[in-house]
Image: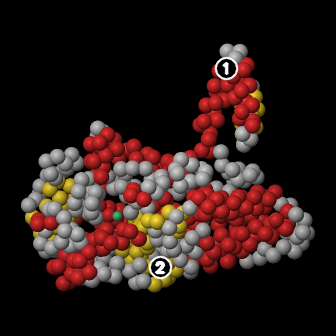
Amino acid sequence: MLQIYNTLSRQKEYFRPIHEGHVGMYVCGPTVYGDAHLGHARPAITFDLLYRYLMHLGYKVRYVRNITDVGHLEHDADEGEDKIAKKARLEQLEPMEVVQYYTNRYHHDMESLNVLPPSIEPHASGHIIEQIAFVKRILENGYAYISNGSVYMDVEKYAKDYHYGKLSGRNLDEIVTDTRELDGQQEKRHSYDFALWKKAAPEHIMHWPSPWSEGFPGWHMECSTMGTKYLGEEFDIHGGGMDLMFPHHEAEIAQSCAALGHDSVRYWMHNNMITIAGKKMGKSYHNFITLEQFFKGEHELLSKPFSPMTIRFFILMAHYRSTVDFSSEALEAAEKGFARLQDAYARLMKSQPSATTTADVAGLNQRCIDAMDDDLNSPIVLQHLFDSAKQINSIADGKATINATDLEELKATWHTFAIEILGLRLEDDAAGSGTDTTPYKGAIDMLLNMRLEAKRNKDWATSDKIRNELTALGFTIKDTKDGFEWSL
Ligand code: ZN
């Protein structure tokens, strides 16, 4: 039976959904003002693993992952310029153009990583009315106050009736000393109060009418509102990166309790963070590597391009609650490991049954289930698949045998765990060297189209030069009736 680690109780708990057979799951999605990087890949893959496993267990899952397109300010939740508005101003675009552009690119990256799309992907800007209604409930219950057109959570009042800090394990005194003094704090009664609604400054381009001012919702408000709108006032799972635990998720709990009188979420789950060569990711470290840069190998910290499946495999090699440190060397090792898995899968698909089984193949399915049931232990599942790969290689090398029934079961187990649950695309280039040519495809196609053009113009020197140089780089070029084919 599935056990997951609940951040709220700080222990593993047996997963029991509120409604039998159904699971409601909410995960904080991206703020769409820039390209997705590794910090986006990890929660996406972690909760994709959970989503896939819950469906494998037979649950009907409603998975909501939001798009933050308003109210996420630069410095903290309440201060600075809106991240999207700033990008729009710098690039002279309509804010929704920025939102659409980066949302499309995010979707493309997620598809490359084989992350399944959520059931609902609500935008914060599309739920302003619902957010205003949520703020009204908090005001009516006496846990918020209006100040100069903005509405703030009255944290002190809230903390008298509820436990503020229960998720992140902080108490109010610690939060006071943690909260930086910033401009605009004079509107708040206490530095730890956070905005539910912000009055827009005259230069602010994204704003809506409300009973309090022309303004916009505080960043935390969208998740409380959209989570309960689509999953109900109480739902099963809320996930996100550990960096969101405070203040974002702590604020969400406070908002829900203040509006509804009870917490909305049964199981809080958080994936751990990613470091790059031992350092936190951040613009000041010059180590903000976007996923596209990984796929194309275009960053000074990367030795070469890494395929989306290498990135996915690398993330799954660590348990989601452990930290992961990215380096080119570690990725190169992961690439080799993934190629071993692909080769084994290709050999398994080509294996022929014998009359008897001498290979040690029994019990793989149950071992993989046990590992997944133990708080989604993907590294252990991979370990079992590597052990199984050794047996597959023995069978393929004629050192062991497998009968027809066992062979079918082994194929099914690999398909279920490697492809469906871990979401690894093993079939791609499965028999090949494991080298992913996707990053070069556009460039090679362009060169070969230039060669076709040269041939049409009877410019044989250019045509030969392109072919010879690509061949020298290890590409195989074949002229066909309709043009060309190539491989590496
Ligand atoms: Zn959120």
- Local secondary structure at mark 1: helix
Question: Which quarter of the rendered picture does the C terminus lie within?
Answer: top right
Q: Is residue 64 above or below residue 457?
A: below
Where residue 452 sits in the image (x, y, percent)?
A: 68, 23
Ligand 1 position by quadrant: bottom left
* Depth order, front residue of 52/250: 250
Residue under the image location 66 percent in, 62 percent down: 333
Residue under the image location 72 percent in, 39 percent down: 473
Q: Which residue is mark 2?
A: 5
Observer able to see residue 414: yes
- Local secondary structure at mark 2: strand
Q: Is residue 236 above or below residue 66?
A: below
Q: Is residue 156 above or below residue 124?
A: below
Q: Is residue 242 above or below residue 79?
A: below
Where residue 253 sits in the image (x, y, percent)?
A: 30, 74
Q: Which residue is mark 1?
A: 454
Q: Are marks 1 and 2 in contact (CB under 8 Å)?
A: no
Q: What amino acid does circle 1 point to?
A: Ala
Observer able to see residue 128: no
Question: Which quarter of the rendered picture does the N terminus lie within?
Answer: bottom right
Residue 37 horizontal side relative to residue 432, left or right:
left
Residue under the image location 19 percent in, 68 percent down: 181
* Depth order, front residue of 146/193: 193
| CA gap, disc 1 and disc 2 | 62 Å
Q: Quadrant of residue 143?
A: bottom left
- Disc 2 residue lies near ligand 1 with CB under 8 A: no
Residue under the image location 52 percent in, 80 percent down: 3
Q: What amino acid does circle 2 point to?
A: Tyr
- First-in-chain label (1 vs 2): 2
